[in-house]
Image: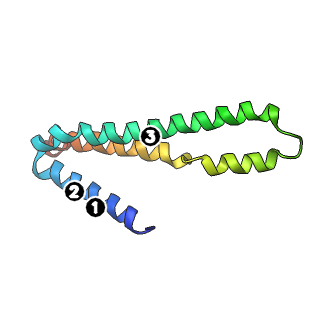
Amino acid sequence: MDKLIPSLIVAALSALTWLAYKHPPAFKMIAAFPMIAVTLIYVAFAIWEFGVSKGYSKMLEFLKPGSFDEAQKQVDELRVLTGWHGAAVFCFNLYMVFLINLPAILRD
């Protein structure tokens, strides 16, 4: 599974690049969908992270001293985003904008 997901991502990006190069009008018609889908998935995970953080902050007042480490471990297990996810979404959207403008770039 560790090698399957990155391989699928590379294949999808290659297919999008090929479509943008060979069929620019078709690519422009579908380009918004992956950008919106990836961004909405990231926003959903960010809302989850916000809920986990707010729940943990509300839970702190009910914890006994000495049980903070265990509570932190539980919260860490619920987290789904790491620091690179936001950068990956940004880079993906930036790459899609580049592909949308690829015909104009190649004409120059």
What is the basis of the colouring in this image? rainbow
Quadrant (top left/top right/bottom left/bottom right) for the N terminus: bottom left
Q: Disc 3 and disc 1: Cα gap in Å? A: 21 Å
99 relative to 51 in the view: left or right: left
- Indicate which label's residue lies in the foreground, 3 or 1: 3
Horizontal side of residue 46 vs 39, given as left or right: right
Residue 11, labelled with which disc? 1
* Label 3 vs 1, first from the N-terminus: 1
Q: Report x, y in % for residue 33.
A: 25, 39
Please say if 17 is above or below 54.
Answer: below
| Residue situated in front as seen by the camera: 89 or 61 | 61
The residue wearing badge 2 is 15
Residue drawn 65% across the image and 36% down it: 53
Given the image, on which type of amino acid does mark 1 rest?
Ala
Q: Secondary structure at mark 1?
A: helix
Which secondary structure lies at badge 2?
helix
**Disc 3: which residue:** 42
